[in-house]
Each structure stands twice: as structure tokens, then as C-alpha cells.
Image (tube, helix red, strand yellow):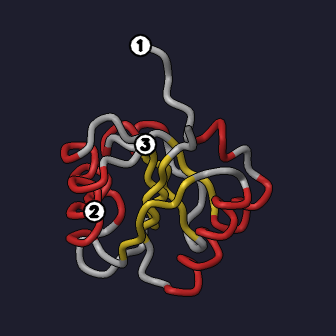
Amino acid sequence: MATRILIVDDDASFLRVAAELLAERGFDVLGQAMDAAQAVAVAIRERPDGILLDINLPGRDGFATATALAGACPSARIVLTSAEAGPVAAEVLRGCRADAFVPKQELATSDLAQLFRRSDP
């Protein structure tokens, strides 16, 4: 069964490119959202296995959105991304309950299967 991913970004062209990339890698893109409210609604409804989340969202930023998504869908693995931000410190990831960060420029060359793999309890 394919890993089901929700993509959250306010850039429609990035949503399209990310969805294509994830589908090519064998993921099931179950939904897309352009802001925090849409993301939480989709996560509650669809219960994704993973969430690719842009840090720079309008309104509630990606860090606050990650916290809300982790509360709404605690089993989802949350991977933050950004074209503008540099590396995100581990304590920041833990603070917002995200699992990883990958720059948008590195998505195509990243091991997405590893990024979205759930840790065994």
C-alpha cells in the first residue's frame, strides 16, 4: 500500500510539481491545501501517512501549522520544506512536532521514502 501524502503550500505551481514528484516516487497524493485551515481539515478527513508542509504560508506559518497538524493527525510524519529558509534546528522541529526539513531545491534528490517512513515504536 502506497504512503498517502498531503501537500501544503500556497504556491499552486509548487503543489503541482510536488504532486508529480511524489507520484513518480510511488506515493499516493491524497490531497493538497493552500493554507493552515485547509490543511487541518484535509488531515482530519483523510488521515495522511505524511505531510509535506511549506514553512512560509499566509496567516499561520508552517511551524504553527505543523503543531496543529500533529495534534489533528498524530500518526502523520510531517516534513517541512521551504525555498527561502536555511536548515531548521532539531529543537525547532521537535518544538513544532515536525519530523524533518528538506529545502525545496533538494526535494528531487532527497530520499523521500526515508523522509516519510514511520519509525517503529
Write down the residue under mark 1: 121
The mark that comes first in sequence, 1 or 2, is: 2
Number of other residues with Cα within 10 Å of mark 2, as a class: few under 14, some 14 to 19, many 20 or more: many
Cα–Cα gap, marks 1 and 2: 26 Å
**SS at badge 1:** loop
* Position in image of residue 52 (x %, y %): 49, 58
Write down the residue under mark 2: 42
The residue located at (69%, 65%) in the rendering is 21
Nearer-the-camera pick, 3 or 120: 3
The tag on residue 49 is 3
The mark that comes first in sequence, 3 or 2, is: 2
The mark that comes first in sequence, 3 or 1, is: 3
Looking at the rendered structure, the kind of residue marked 2 is Val
* Image quarter (top left, top right, bottom left or bottom right) of the N terminus: top right
Nearer-the-camera pick, 42 or 51: 42
The residue located at (25%, 49%) in the rendering is 67
